[in-house]
Image (spheres, helix red, strand yellow):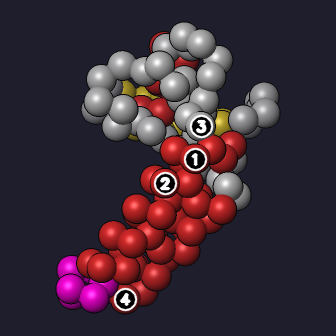
Amino acid sequence: MPETTTTRTERDTMGEMQVPAEAYYGASTQRAVLNFPISGLRMPRRFVRALGLIKQAAAQVNRELGKLPPDLAAAIADAAGEVAEGKLDAQFVVDVFQTGSATIT
């Protein structure tokens, strides 16, 4: 993400965090960016694409199973499609070498 001076306040279980105003992510991701700048490397494009395709398929299947309302499933599938297409790559800001179970990714 480009440097910004405009932020918003987000909260997670660890408290408040200032996040770039234009970011789609929240406090936990911003905290990981600040606390673990290990290599400067980001997730490979192929990996991010695969995540998008999996989320898109999951939204469609859960709609078909009646587990998600059609409008919510469509919104999730559309956003996941944008991830798969690379339109949201700038939102994947956490170092490829990260702590824990990679839930921030």
Circle 2 sits in a helix, a strand or a loop, which is it? helix
Residue 89 belongs to magenta span: no
- Which three-letter amino acid code belongs to the residue tagged 2? Ala
Q: Report the residue marked by disc 3.
A: 44
Looking at the image, is mark 2 or mark 4 earlier in the sequence?
2
Q: Report the residue marked by disc 2.
A: 50
The image shows residue 75 at horizontal and vertical percentages of 49, 76
- Does the CB distance between marks 2 and 3 fall below 8 Å? no
- Which three-letter amino acid code belongs to the residue tagged 3? Pro
Q: Report the residue marked by disc 4.
A: 70
Please tell me whether residue 7 is drawn above or below residue 52 in the rendered image: above
Q: CA distance from mark 4 to mark 3?
A: 31 Å
Looking at the image, is mark 1 or mark 4 earlier in the sequence?
1
- Does the CB distance between marks 2 and 4 fall below 8 Å? no
Residue 65 belongs to magenta span: yes
The image shows residue 23 at horizontal and vertical percentages of 63, 45
Residue situated in front as seen by the camera: 71 or 54: 54
Q: Report the residue marked by disc 1.
A: 46
Question: What residue lies at 59% left-to-right and 37% top-to-bottom?
Answer: 44
Q: CA distance from mark 2 to mark 4?
A: 23 Å
